[in-house]
Image: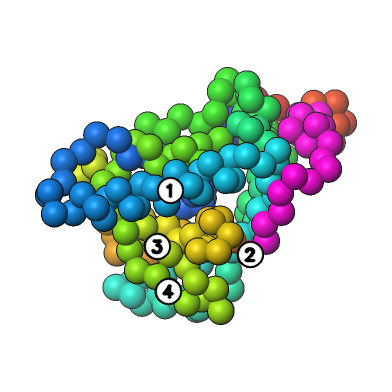
């Protein structure tokens, strides 16, 4: 059981990393001359949250890349890590690094396919470490960050408007988050996280679909199935 607990903690950390990068902004102090910039950034975030929040469900395919020039790791040195997530309200089904994470709105099921182990816990992963989670995808920006408008960039013919988010917590492992939105669709397109260790992790949404016909079973844990497959359920 100790092995299962250790593995599940590692898996939760992997989930925290992804969810913190994939996709908190209330009380803070800023200089008076930057108030228009802040207002513009908040308006954009609210518009994106309102538009994406109106969908019945979302399917998101993404890719992740990591670089750290100080450690000699350049972007493109390794192939991107890919994953997919289905979201419906607070419920989600995430496939990432060969593992599955199912949250049915009450319990979280972390399924480690390599070790054939499953961890079950009440509620979503706690966000006490400042990271962001799937059920908070459209509201995470409402607390925890100072923020400002970034630059408008061209990415493969698409105009991407960036907003920069700086954690209020000075001890955070995250130095800055650069969140990019498609200026036309008002959808999240890219998230760049810069860590205190000079690492840069980039998540890019490669596929986005909304209001799909999906089965509610997608967010249901099939205990009998995994018992039959001899998984260890903790």
Lower sequence index among marks 1 and 4: 1
Between marks 4 and 2 in the image, the one whose residue lies nearer the viewer: 4
Q: Dividing the picture into quarters, in which one does residue 4 lie? A: top right
Q: Position of residue 97 (x, y in %)?
A: 63, 54
Q: Which residue bears the numbered disc 4?
A: 153
Quarter placement of the N terminus = top right
Q: Dot 4 surroundings within 10 Å: few (below 14), some, or many (20 or more)?
A: some
11 relative to 197, above or below? above
Image point 24% across, 40% down: which residue? 169
Which residue is denoted by mark 3 in the rendering? Answer: 162
Q: CA distance from mark 3 to mark 4?
A: 8 Å
The x, y position of residue 22, in whole percent, is 51, 52
Mark 2 vs mark 1, CA separation in Å? 20 Å
- Name the residue nearer the viewer: 7 or 87: 87
| Stretch in magenta | 206-222
Q: Secondary structure at mark 1?
A: helix
Which residue is the site of mark 1? 45
Residue drawn 63% across and 33% down?
89
Disc ID at residue 206: 2
Total residue callouts: 4
In the image, is 118 to the left or to the right of 66?
right
* Alpha carbon distance from label 4 to label 2: 17 Å
Q: Position of residue 33 (x, y in %)?
A: 13, 54
Q: Is residue 171 above or below residue 182?
A: above
Query: Which residue shows up at 32% across the image and 59% down it?
Result: 149
């Amino acid at each position: 059981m100790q092995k299962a607990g250790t593995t599940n903690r590692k898996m939760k950390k992997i989930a925290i990393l992804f969810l913190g990068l994939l996709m908190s902004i209330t009380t803070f102090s800023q200089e008076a001359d930057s108030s228009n910039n802040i207002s513009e950034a908040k308006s954009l975030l609210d518009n994106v949250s309102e538009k994406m929040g109106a969908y019945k469900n979302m399917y998101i395919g993404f890719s992740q890349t990591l670089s750290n020039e100080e450690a000699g790791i350049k972007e493109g040195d390794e192939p991107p890590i890919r994953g997919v997530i289905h979201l419906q309200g607070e419920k989600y089904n995430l496939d990432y690094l060969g593992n599955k994470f199912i949250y049915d709105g009450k319990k979280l099921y972390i399924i480690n396919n390599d070790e054939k182990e499953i961890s079950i816990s009440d509620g979503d992963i706690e966000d006490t470490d400042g990271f962001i989670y799937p059920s908070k995808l459209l509201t995470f920006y409402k607390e925890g960050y100072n923020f400002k408008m970034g630059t408008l960039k061209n990415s493969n013919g698409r105009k991407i408007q960036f907003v920069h988010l700086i954690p209020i917590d000075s001890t955070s492992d995250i130095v800055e988050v650069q969140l990019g939105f498609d200026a036309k669709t008002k959808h999240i397109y890219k998230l760049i996280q810069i860590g205190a260790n000079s690492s840069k992790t980039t998540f890019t949404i490669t596929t986005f679909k909304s209001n799909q016909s999906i089965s509610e079973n997608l967010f249901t844990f099939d205990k009998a199935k995994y018992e039959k497959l001899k998984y260890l359920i903790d």
